[in-house]
Amino acid sequence: MQNLVVIDHPLVQHKLSHMRKKDTSTSAFRALLEEVSMLLAYEATRDLPVTRAPIETPLEAMDAPFLDGKKVVLVSILRAGNGILDGMLKVLPSARVGHVGLYRDHETLQPVEYYFRVPQEMGERDVIMCDPMLATGNSAVAAISRVKQTNPRSIKYVCLLAAPEGVKVLQDAHPDVKVYTAALDRQLNEKGYILPGLGDAGDRLFGTK
């Protein structure tokens, strides 16, 4: 699949395997998601543009690389996206933060928006959108469409798990958005959950089964 990056680093896969286990506690799941998110952030920011500026080290002057443009914006797709957001902020502590509130109608599987807030002046910013699960792709498409209305410089989508069906839906709607995930799982079940998956990421993150 084009514009899909599966991050198969051994540390990522090891931590993801522990998250998949049904007997992993809420606290352990939360800690593991934060750790994996830091590693996902490292990969998703690999090609951010840099510029060079003069600095003084303790020994001499040099031209040093710095991120180019306004600060990155991390956009969490509520509520489960906050689990990835927390980890990414460890790596990008000065990033701006936005939120898109969506819930999935369990009858139609379509997203319903209830909240939207992002920083002002998005035109020169690079956006990284965060949501643990790319399942049907409907919520991802809706969230990306909403963020695109603010005209950011670029958008990437970072998730923990993706289903082939969701990746196709997202890429058909937004072929310019690169998807980063720790695993491309087998398929969706009849209720729109990823198989083998890890269950409902929001419920496992917040202990609300």
Image: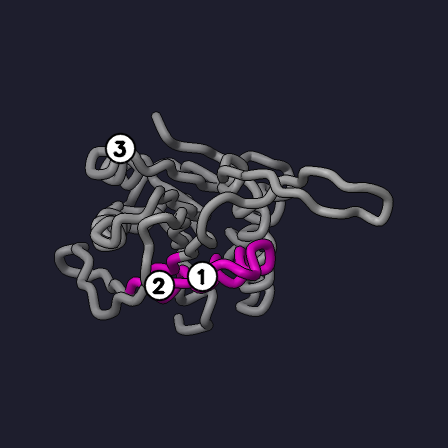
Q: Which mark is residue 119?
A: 2
Dot in front, 2 or 3: 2
Q: Residue at x 73, y 38 (%)?
A: 62
Label 2: few (<14), some (14–19) or many (≥20) C-alpha neighbours in 10 Å: few
Which type of secondary structure does the marked residue at label 1 adopt? Answer: strand
Q: CA distance from mark 3 to mark 1?
A: 25 Å
Of the 4 image quadrants, the one containing the C terminus is bottom left
**Seen from this angle, which residue lies furthest bottom?**
208
**Viewer-side residue, 24 vs 178:** 178
Residue extent of the magenta highlight: 75-100
User: The residue under label 2 is which amino acid type?
Assistant: Pro
**Viewer-side residue, 54 vs 140:** 54
User: The residue under label 3 is which amino acid type?
Assistant: Pro
Residue at mark 1: 96
Residue 204 is situated, as x and y percent measured from the top left of the image, at 45, 65
Looking at the picture, the colour scheme in use is one colour
Label 3: few (<14), some (14–19) or many (≥20) C-alpha neighbours in 10 Å: few
